Image (spheres, rainbow, N blue to C red):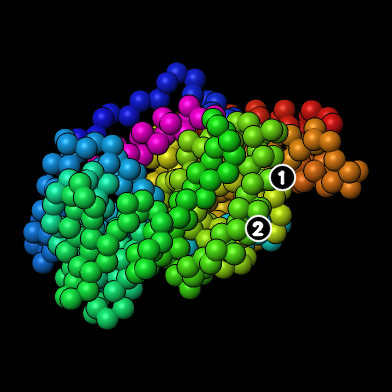
Amino acid sequence: MKPRRPTMPAGLFDRIAAGEGGGRALRVLSAAEYGKRLMLLRAVVDEATARAHPEVETARRAYGTLAVLQRRAPGAVREVLAYPGVGALAVAVLRGLAGGGLDRGLEARSGPRADVTLDSSAATLAGPGVGPGWLASVAAAAAVRARVSMSVPVRVHGRGVVLPSLGLAEFPRAAEGQEAIVLTGGAGAAVATGDQVVRVPEDPHQESGPWLGLRRLAVGTGRDTLTLLVDDVDPLRFPLLDRCAPRLSRDDVAAWRAVLTPAWRLLVRTHGGVAAETMAGLKVLVPLRPPSGATSSAAFGSLVLALPPDPVTLALSLAREIQHAKLSALGALFPLIGPENGEMLPVPWGDDPRPVGALVHDAYAHLGTAAFWSRQTRVPQPPEALRHARTELARWSRAAWDVTTILLAGDHLTPQGHRFTTGMRRSLSTLRTTPPA
């Protein structure tokens, strides 16, 4: 499984820096992220081999299975390997092998408003019993999708056996680490351990007895359809599991749909670029308990969010999170900041100082927020809502401008980082000087 060398079309870097890029940018960045995902999986096997980890043979067999499946059913393998949780776990396991421990590295993102948002970009998800042998569940999920006849040994973790991108086979009587077998083929798939057997339904995204599929949440129509998988079963879906919402009831899913449908309609009608980026870049929703929200550079394509109170808030959340996703993926291609030495920089809104990388993310998310409210000023709406949009535009464009001023005044940015930040400034200058509608 060899990744292709990532390329960035001429001019696209500057469009992304300006806060734009559209679906094309997300497709390019997603392809680069997939290549990075392949390298991460190879690195897990190599590191496990170098350290003679007790699960190294399991990891090798799983990697070999994935290589075979990629030749026979490349689309099925890509569906699984591109799943956001696979990237997060690969990073976590690799850090664990390298002696990184369980550094969750969570830090609050903050701004002029008291948002409670977590940055899990440095989070290590691996817990006890999660090592390189975890690759077996990835291989098993790919085999299920490929409908290839195989028998893949895996391990029970938490409530059962998770098949990334598909769902969870519940085994309430099984012990942690107990061996299970995933049997796949053209006639369907099943997961078995001891005398317990869980059959995976024809459509694995359905719920069937002890099989808890990742349900689809689809809104919109035709080419403007957004489809998200709702991950509310994987015990490793987010570093702080106690913040995750439990399995959503049908009423819970309906509540999400009731807010997402008008939010998506707003994005398609008024924020077309954000809508195109969201369709191309976001694949998974991890529901949280209120009021948290998060994104993870290791879990590219995942939206981690509590149910927002209204459609505009959700639309704004999508606009902000796609900014974080773009920046995380771009930063993996082009180093935007130099080696961080632990230095913390002041923030304009008076919170505790923050690392340089966090400030770049702040500025880019604030740019996306300001652009969102600028477009909102052109939407027919009651006077009070229009005043709110104008106030938010002024607030967030000023916040982003102040952060970029701090960044450009120091020597922490690489040449690419300086170019990127200057690109943000150009967009912000337009937002700050164009009279709102």
- State the quadrant of the C terminus: top right
Q: How many marks?
A: 2
The structure residue drawn at horizontal position 58% and vertical position 64%, both measured from the top left corner, is 252
Q: Is residue 37 visible?
A: no
The structure residue drawn at horizontal position 41% and vertical position 30%, both measured from the top left corner, is 28
Q: Secondary structure at mark 2?
A: loop
First to last magenta residue range = 22-46
The structure residue drawn at horizontal position 33% and vertical position 43%, both measured from the top left corner, is 79
**Residue corresponding to mark 2:** 308
Q: Position of residue 349 (x, y in %)?
A: 70, 55
Give left or right: position of 409 versus 49.
right
The structure residue drawn at horizontal position 53% and vertical position 25%, both measured from the top left corner, is 14
Q: Can you tell which of label 1 and label 2 is closer to the viewer?
A: 2
Classify residue 160 by image quadrant.
bottom left
Q: Secondary structure at mark 1?
A: helix
Give left or right: position of 63 versus 103.
left
Q: Position of residue 138 (x, y in %)?
A: 25, 53
Q: Position of residue 85 (x, y in %)?
A: 37, 54
Up-down relation of residue 418 to residue 120 (above or below): above
* Mark drawn on residue 396: 1
In the depicted view, which residue is nearer to us: 319 or 16?
319
Up-down relation of residue 212 to residue 173 (above or below): above
Please say whether residue 51 is one of the residues in the magenta stretch. no
- Mark 2 neighbour density, 10 Å: few (under 14) some (14–19) many (20 or more): some
Please say whether residue 32 is one of the residues in the magenta stretch. yes
